[in-house]
Image (cartoon, rainbow, N blue to C red):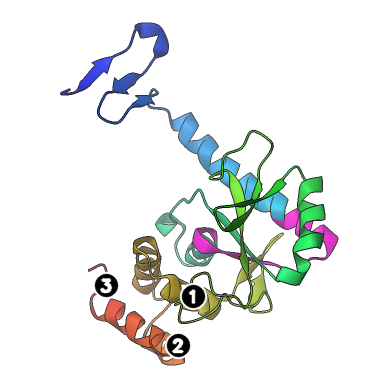
Amino acid sequence: MRGVKREPAETGGLYSRSMSVVLGPFSLDRMEQAVEKVRDRLLRACGALEAAGVAYAVAGGNAVALWVSRVDEAAVRNTRDVDIVLRRSDLPAATVALEAAGFLYRHVKGLDVFLDGPEAKVRDAVRVLFAGERVHIGDAEPIPDVSESEAGEGFRVLSLEALVRNKLTAFRRKDQTHLDDMIELGLIDEATASKMPAPLGERLRGLLADPGG
């Protein structure tokens, strides 16, 4: 391979001079462990908040995966992100509950996160979204309230309408991909768009007119 040299056999990996990363061996076990770590992080966080009586809702890619799995588990996309919605007034109680479960609260680059242990990176964290607040000043809609949620098995997840509204507000590439997945499975359609405030309804209609485009 051009620009890639093999490290000594004992390293078991490749080193890319252009990317400056060490590539470990291909491993299905590592893939499975990565998914399990995210699932464990999500369930521990939800369990701690449930036990403490702190209102919350699962958001982000995990919320999409939970809704998608109700239609077709083969269409579920894995995600490393664990996003939860909290009311800002509940942050102190949530901090006590989550730190008792092994998480550490940090405010990093404008984000409120709970790292999964003292050695964890920000990507190994539970990210907090505050209900009723806008992530960015220009956002069309604020983060939905935790009351817009449904109960699952050991967790609460944003309702479908609230989740779609949130994804249409963020509207990054991955949000559009998540929306395309839900469109393909019939979870959202023109009836959903009619319930969205402008300009979110128009954004959804654009995706409906050109799914996957």
- Look at the image and give the residue range highlighted in magenta: 46-62
Is 93 displayed left or right of 29 in the figure? right
Q: Residue at x 77, y 67 (%)?
A: 90
- The residue wearing badge 2 is 196
Secondary structure under tag 2 reads loop
Q: Is residue 181 above or below residue 210?
A: above
- The residue wearing badge 3 is 211
Q: Is residue 99 above or below residue 13?
A: below
- The residue wearing badge 1 is 137
Is 165 displayed left or right of 97 in the figure? left
Q: How many marks?
A: 3
Q: CA distance from mark 2 to mark 1?
A: 20 Å
Q: Quadrant of the N terminus?
A: top left
**Neighbourhood count class around disc 1 (C-alpha, 10 Å): few under 14, some 14–19, many 20 upward:** few
Q: What amino acid is labelled 3 in the image?
A: Pro
Judge depth for marks 3 and 1 and give the one in front.
1
